[in-house]
Image (cartoon, rainbow, N blue to C red):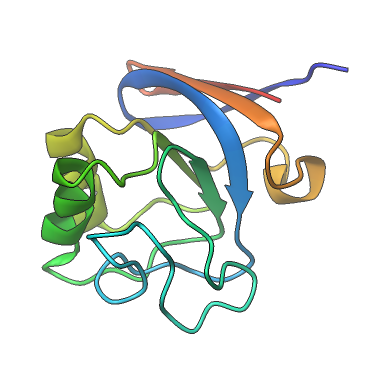
Amino acid sequence: MSRTIAARGIVDGSAQGPALVGAEPVSFLGDVDIRSGRVVGDLPSLRNATVKGTVLIFPYTRGSAGAWRFLYQLFKHRNAPVAIITQTVPDPSVVQGAILAGIPIACEPEADIATLVENGAAVSVDVKDGKATIRL
């Protein structure tokens, strides 16, 4: 069964990939190794998972002023997620990194996506002009 969910669009773009669902907030500064894309931070739901090529779904970002560099470096090393979906508006530094890397971001979905999709399930994200469409 296919389901379409509306959300707020933050960074324009379209992507599809397997879902990687985390229960904890993610900081790209320290939680993810840029050379491998592997989650190395203390995130039990994502421990040892790889963000590379995934639609990364998690509650919110734990930002810092330098987070944009780490997200962009994930992209440069070809280890970045293809899209990001968060429950709340992401940290501005994460948004900056996503813009530079061309990674669409959707937030504030009308349904709790984390409860509707399992890891590995196909997800597509289309973001344009402040609106996002998520297909599960």
> Is residue 2 placed above or below 29 in the rendered structure?
above
Of residues 65 and 50, the one nearer the viewer is 50
Please tell me which residue is depicted at 12% across the width and 37% down the height of the picture.
Answer: 100
Q: Where is residue 38 in the image (x, y as percent from the top left)?
A: 41, 63
Q: How many numbered markers are drawn?
A: 0
Instruction: Find the residue positioned furthest to the right.
Output: 1
Please tell me which residue is depicted at 49% across the width and 40% down the height of the picture.
Answer: 54
Please tell me which residue is depicted at 19% across the width and 63% down the height of the picture.
Answer: 67
Quarter of the C terminus within the rendering:
top right
Please tell me which residue is depicted at 61% across the width and 40% down the height of the picture.
Answer: 19
45 horizontally vs 77: left or right? right
131 horizontally vs 72: left or right? right
- Can you tell which quarter of the image residue 40 is in? bottom left
Q: Position of residue 82 (x, y in %)?
A: 39, 34
63 horizontally vs 100: left or right? right
Q: Position of residue 129 (x, y in %)?
A: 32, 16
Quarter of the N terminus within the rendering:
top right
